Image: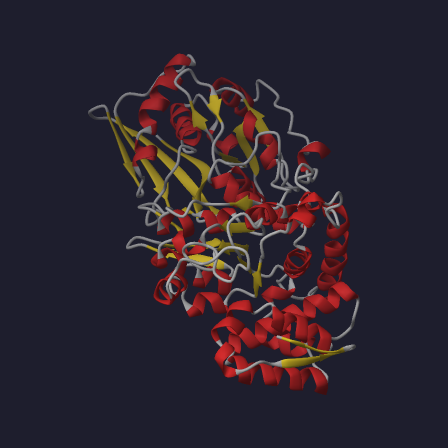
Amino acid sequence: MLARVKSGALRGVDAYLVEVEVDLSPGESKIFYVGLPEIAVRESKDRVRAALRNSGYRFPRGRITINLAPADVRKEGTGFDLPVAMGLLAAQGVVPPESLGNYLVFGELSLDGRLRPTRGVLSMALATREAKLALILPRENAREAGVVQGIDIYPAATLAEVVEFLAGRQVIAPAPPPEPEALAWDPAEDLDFKEVKGQEPVKRALLIAAAGAHNVLMVGPPGAGKTMLARRLPSILPPLGFEEALETSKVYSIMGLLPREKALVTTRPFRSPHHTISDAGLIGGGTTPRPGEVSLAHYGVLFLDELPEFKRSTLEVLRQPLEEGRVTISRAATSLTYPARFMLVAAMNPCPCGYYGDPRRPCACTPKQINQYRSRISGPLLDRIDLQIQVPAVRFQELAAAAGGSGSPELRQRVERAKEVQARRFIKSRIFANAHMTSRLVKQYCPLNPEAQRLLEAAMERLALSARAYHRILKIARTIADLEGETHPAAAHVAEAIQYRTLDRQFSSEKGAVFVKEAKGRYLV
């Protein structure tokens, strides 16, 4: 006898429908899985056998063929346990086959018949809604799936509950929408910029970075506060919008990292991998490709401390996600694309000993050592970092001062106002921040007056800036203008944006200085 059950599988961060076909025929008692199942799927036969017997149902004898269609796409995960069990019971007549037509069934079975939570349920719920079906899943996953509106979700605790529900002998109430607490934003109130003494210019640069989602590189001696500043950056970022939260939560769902008490990831992620991380750990990969740190930092912050200590090959793979906001992992059998729209925040010392340029401590490094140290970061990667800022050592007077400048709540309000301006500006686009503007959008939204144009032209000539650096200066100037409530970037905004190309200025110092005009005279860039 043949039975069909609708289920789903993951491909990247999205789910697609899989039809589980179960055929019972006479012959030697064997189970055959077809349809490119990986090892966790093939092992389900033992879990299903034990779960059926321990739940009081008979495991069929004879030749059992289980096909997972479409058969040309590899299937992975433990979510096929429950649909396979339902197919076996439907093929025996225990479950009415016609009752399965309106449901997508997904869940892992324990040996005693209990349903265990599975990964990727959020993506599965979205695929269920697109297919206009209802969803049967483990009870522990109901809150996560409940975020998706427009579908009926039936959570169950055991295999027997699902059987009785499909047979019409038991009622399972549809899961209610998640409670407001599960969707509420939980800001990192334990970290506040007010705790950082001094470093007001650096705070200003991070404010601009947060307002426009710009990448940042901080260069300074040990103990200057680079890590402390980076860890407080999420405290001034606004909460994720619903679409942003949904995209981020899908990544965390398929990795099994979505908090049980939360239906969505509502706080922007902060990921800080160690410098010994591999290429696959940072970008994603493996035999069966999985998301890496860049995808876990989607719409959040990826902090790379001691940037030159990372392997150069590992840093170079950042170039695609920094430019495109996604990462593509290709294997012989498949090619998967994961989202990776993150803010890169990096920190490094100016030299191996850390004290090059420090007025109080002499540098012990030779020019050759300094050049070798800095050359670990390629020019193309530096080009993709919008703000390159110096973080000097903090003086005693600043450390001993009672006040620490503006706090995170105040800075967050300024960031949110700038974000509102950008939301209105990009309402017809699939972008959310100035840093993500294409060349066409830069031309449209960053017009310069003649004074600002002459200033930028002088900087391009004297500092030998690339075309990419040119566009990034315009994006930063646009963000500064948004923070100031200005309609168009002015010369002062462009001048400040040029100052944030610290390494460009250092490496081009022999070409001369660029002077920019300000309201009260001029200052050196």
Instruction: Give the answer, above or below, for where 346 lies relative to 167.
Output: below
Which residue appears at 62% of the width and 62% of the height?
A: 431
**Percent coordinates x, y for residue 184 in the rendering:** 70, 37
| Relative image position of residue 453 (x, y in whole percent) | 66, 84
Q: Quadrant of the N terminus?
A: top left
177 with respect to 366 (left or right): right
The type of colouring in the image is secondary structure
Can residue 42 be seen?
A: yes
In front: 181, or 18?
181
Quadrant position of the C terminus in the picture: bottom right
In this rendering, the answer to whether 192 lies above or below 114 is below
Q: Is residue 466 visible?
A: no
Q: Residue at x 28, y 21 (%)?
A: 61
Residue drawn at 41 percent across, 52 percent down = 283
User: Where residue 133 sits in the image (x, y, percent)?
Assistant: 57, 40
Extreme-left residue of the structure: 28
Image coordinates for residue 98, horizontal then vertical, percent:
50, 32
Which residue is more in the foreground, 35 or 376? 376
Between 20 and 269, the one nearer to me in the picture = 269
Q: How many marks?
A: 0
